[in-house]
Image: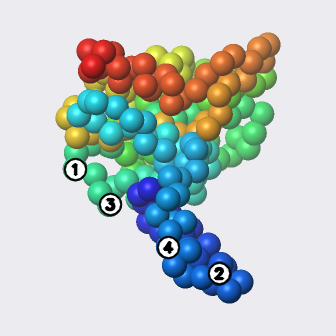
């Protein structure tokens, strides 16, 4: 696990366990064996020269915390792939766009779980915040989430970090008329395999 927020989470858990009288050595052993929560700052194993992370963050505060953590240890660019869920709080969309644009070096706006909403309209809502604050901003928009992830991975440069936000551990994508199988980790792994030439 990496990221300052994970340190805070571990310290909170340790404090509670100590409060219940759990032996400190047992706590240390448990922390050493813990591999993290699926879909939370999860590293996608690969044999390429880039880092790919998947995180469930889907609020302005969540995205801000994760990007701030990544920026503490990045060596090159941070590329963020994200969208916003449909039928949820629309007010947060412009704010998420601004945070992504300000804290990542590149962003690709895409679909999350659009549900009953038009995914294009959701992306436009995210854009309103960016355009209002940064009229000359340049970024990518790819409605198809699989293609957005693939573009980020195939075009990343050595030592770049790609963070894919919004769905984390989820293995599906919700549309107005259907639910499809979709796992950010699997889609990223396929693109990474293609990038490495199947090695």
The 10 Å Cα crowd at callout 2, few under 14, some 14 to 19, many 20 or more, is: few
- In x, y percent, where is residue 146? 50, 19
- In x, y percent, where is residue 102? 39, 49
- Mark 1 to mark 2: distance in Å? 39 Å
In contact (CB < 8 Å): disc 2 and disc 3: no
- Mark 3 to mark 4: distance in Å? 25 Å
**At x 35% / y 24%, what residue is drawn?**
192
> Is residue 6 among what the camera can see?
yes
- In x, y percent, where is residue 141? 46, 24
The reply, left or right, for residue 53 in relation to residue 156 is: right
> Is residue 96 among what the camera can see?
no
Up-down relation of residue 35 to residue 56 (above or below) = below
What kind of element bears circle 2? Answer: loop
Q: Which residue is mark 2?
A: 22
**At x 46% / y 17%, what residue is drawn?**
147
Marks 2, 3: nearer the viewer: 2
Looking at the rendered structure, which numbered label has been put on residue 72? 3
In this view, the residue in front, 141 or 151, is: 151
In contact (CB < 8 Å): disc 1 and disc 4: no
In this view, the residue in front, 164 or 44, is: 44
In this view, the residue in front, 134 or 102, is: 102
Q: Considering only order in the chain, which callout, 2 or 1, is on the residue closer to the N terminus? A: 2
Marks 1, 4: nearer the viewer: 4
Q: Considering only order in the chain, which callout, 4 or 2, is on the residue closer to the N terminus? A: 2
In contact (CB < 8 Å): disc 3 and disc 1: no
Q: Quadrant of the N terminus?
A: bottom left
Q: Which residue is mark 1?
A: 75
Q: Which residue is mark 4?
A: 28
- Mark 3 to mark 1: distance in Å? 9 Å
């Amino acid at each position: 696990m990496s990221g300052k927020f994970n340190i805070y989470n571990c310290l909170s858990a340790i404090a509670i366990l100590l409060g219940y009288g759990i032996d400190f050595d047992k706590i240390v052993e448990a922390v050493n064996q813990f591999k993290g929560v699926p879909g939370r700052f999860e590293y996608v194993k690969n044999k390429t020269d880039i880092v790919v992370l998947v995180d469930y963050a889907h609020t302005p505060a969540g995205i801000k915390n994760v990007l701030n953590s990544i920026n503490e240890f990045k060596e090159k660019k941070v590329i963020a792939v994200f969208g916003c869920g449909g039928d949820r709080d629309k007010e947060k969309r412009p704010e998420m766009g601004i945070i992504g644009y300000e804290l990542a070096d590149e962003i690709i706006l895409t679909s999350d779980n659009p549900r009953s909403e038009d995914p294009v309209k959701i992306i436009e809502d995210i854009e309103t915040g960016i355009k209002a604050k940064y009229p000359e901003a340049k970024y990518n928009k790819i409605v198809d989430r699989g293609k957005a992830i693939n573009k980020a991975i195939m075009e990343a440069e050595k030592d770049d970090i790609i963070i894919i936000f919004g769905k984390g551990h989820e293995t599906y994508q919700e549309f107005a008329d259907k639910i499809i199988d979709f796992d950010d980790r699997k889609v990223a792994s396929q693109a990474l395999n293609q990038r490495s030439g199947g090695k």
